[in-house]
Image: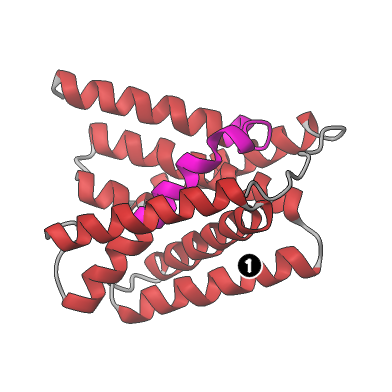
Amino acid sequence: MGFESLCATLIALFLGLVLCFAGYRLFLTLLPLWGFLFGFALGAQSIQLLFGVGFLETITSWLVGFLVGAVFALLSYLFFAFAVAMIAGSLGYGLGLGFMGLVAVDWNWLVWLVGILAAIAAIAVTFVLDLQKYAIIVATAIGGAGIIVGALMFGYVGMTVDEFFESPIRFAVQDSPLWAIVLVLLVALGIVSQVVSNQSYEIEAYKNRI
C-alpha cells in the first residue's frame, strides 16, 4: 500500500468510526457532508445508468454528482425536514442496494429502482411513525460501518476508488461472507452504542434557515 492509499484509508476509517459510534450526536455537524456524499453518489449513479457508462468515467457524471451533492447539502442545511428525509432516504437506498448485492444482482436499472423505492419507503415510515431519532442512528451506524469495511477493502483487498464511492456495502457483501459478517457486527455495535449513549439526548430541530 502506498503512502497516499494509507492516508486515505486511515482518514476513511476515522470518519467511519465517528459516524458509526457517534453519528447521532454529531448529526447536525456532519449533515452537509452526508448530504453531499449521498447526492454525489446518487447523481453519478443515475448518469451511469442513463448513458450506460462506468461510474465516474465521464465529466458529465462528475458534474452531475457535484451538482446534486451540493443541492442536497444546501437543502439539508436549510430545512430540517429535508435533512431527516435525506438521512432516511439514504438509509433505504443503501439497504436496497445492499440487498440486491446480497442476491448477486449486477448493477443495472433494477438495482437502482429497488434503491429508490426502498428510499421512499424509508422516508414514509420515518415520518409516519415519528422515528427520526432512530432513522438517524441506524443510518449513521450503517453508513459508518460501510465506510469502515470499504476502507479496509480499499486498503487490503484492492477495492477501487470507484467501487468505494459507488457502494462499499454492496461490494462488501458480494466479495466475501467474512466482510458481510464484519459489516453486520459493526452495524449492531454502532446502533447499540448510540441508543445507549443517547437515551436522554435529543437533537433539537432547527427552524428553516431562509
Compared to residue 97, the image places residue 12 above or below, namely: above
- In this rendering, the answer to whether 108 lies above or below 152 is below
Quarter of the picture containing the N terminus is top left
Residue at the right extreme of this rendering: 200
Figure disc tally = 1
Indicate whether 176 appears above or below 95.
above
Numbered range of the magenta stretch: 20-40
Residue at (30, 28) in percent of width and height = 9
Q: Residue at x 29, y 47 (%)?
A: 164
Image spot of residue 115 (x, y percent): 46, 71
Please name whichever residue, 88 or 5, is drawn nearer the observer in this view of the structure: 88
> In the image shown, does 137 or 73 lie closer to the viewer?
73
Dot 1: few (<14), some (14–19), or many (≥20) neighbours within 10 Å? many
Q: Which residue is mark 1?
A: 122
Left or right of 20: which side holds 157?
left
Q: Which residue: 71% across, 38% down?
A: 192
Q: Is residue 77 above or below residue 116?
A: above
Q: Secondary structure at mark 1?
A: helix
- Percent x, y for residue 189? 63, 36
The residue lying furthest to the front in this view is 210
Q: Looking at numbered disc 1 in the image, what kind of residue is underneath it?
A: Ala
Residue at horizontal 68%, vertical 50%? 208
Q: Nearer the viewer, residue 125 or 86?
A: 86
